Structure formats: structure tokens, C-alpha cells
Amino acid sequence: MRAVDKHSGIPAYLQIMNIIKKEIVIGNLKSQDRLPPVRELQKTFGVNVNTVMRALEKLQTEDILEAQHGVGYFVKESKIINPEVIEILKKSVKELKEMDMDLNTTMLILEEVWRNVE
């Protein structure tokens, strides 16, 4: 896990939520895994403890994490992506980079294509 980008314009708690979700999706965090303690996450992300708590509570509301009082936060359900999907995306991203496509434009195009494909 990495520190949040305080200059991205995206609220820190949302960045933390996305980082944790990504760790679950790629399989670094699995069902029933315990997250590091809040204070450790605070140092890792480089934010206030309240920001970490807000992210964890929202993930709990989304049914992604489960809190056990006095013990910590645990991954409720792991939704690991098939490795083949990641390989397909890697190939596509490599080709896009070779065509000098930037991330923001790629995301805009992906979102539009996603909406229009049945």
C-alpha cells in the first residue's frame, strides 16, 4: 500500500478506499484477512487517523470490511480478478502506451466503451 496523493483532487478517504479495494481485487488481501492496525494505516497513507477511520467505516458500510471491536478490521469478502483478465489488460495498456495515450484519456475512452458494449 502507498501514501495518498494529497494533490490529486480526490479526497484522501476515497483514495484509501480505492487502495484497499484494489488490494482485495488483485488478491493481496483475501477473505478474513485482518487489515493492519489503524495507526499503522495512518502512517502508511500519510493522513490523519480520522481519515483512515472514515475510509474503513465506509468500506464497512459497503459490506467489504467487517469490524471486530477491539480486534480490528477484516476483509469480509474477497473478489479476486481472474489472472487472465489482468494479462489482457496489461497487453492493452502496453499497446495504448506505445500509441502515447495518457491515463486520463484512456479512462475516458474505457468508460465510454464500457457503457456502449452489451
Image (cartoon, rainbow, N blue to C red):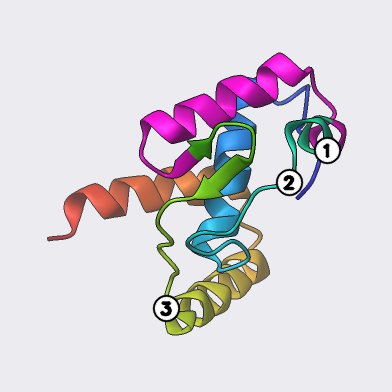
Task: Name the image quarter holding the C terminus.
Answer: bottom left
> Dot 1 corresponds to which residue?
40
Residue 82 badge: 3
Tell me the mark number nearer the camera, choosing from 2 and 3. 2
Mark 2 or 3, nearer chain start: 2
Q: Residue at x 81, y 30 (%)?
A: 39
Which residue, given by chain and number where applicable, does mark 2 sit on? 36
Q: In this orientation, which residue lies closer to the viewer: 105 or 41?
A: 41
In three-dimensional space, the C-alpha distance between marks 3 and 1, rounded to whole angstroms, equals: 30 Å
- What amino acid is found at the position of numbered circle 2 in the picture? Pro
Range of magenta residues = 43-66
Is 55 magenta? The answer is yes
Give the image location of residue 108, x and y in percent: 44, 43
Pointers 2 and 1 in contact (CB under 8 A)? yes
Disc 3 secondary structure class:
loop
- Which percent across, then down, holds residue 21? 52, 48
Callout 3: 10 Å neighbours few (<14), some, many (20+)?
Answer: few
Q: CA distance from mark 2 to mark 1?
A: 6 Å
* 93 horizontally vs 61: left or right: right
Q: Residue 79 or 111: which is nearer the viewer?
A: 79
Circles 2 and 3: CB atoms closer than 8 Å? no
Q: Quadrant of residue 73?
A: top right
Question: Separation of disc 2 and disc 3 at Cα?
Answer: 25 Å
Whether residues under marks 3 and 1 lie with C-beta atoms below 8 angstroms apart, the answer is: no
- Give the camera-side residue of 85 and 117: 85
Crowdedness of circle 1 by 10 Å Cα count: few (<14), some, many (20+)?
Answer: few
* The residue positioned farthest toward the left in the image shown: 118
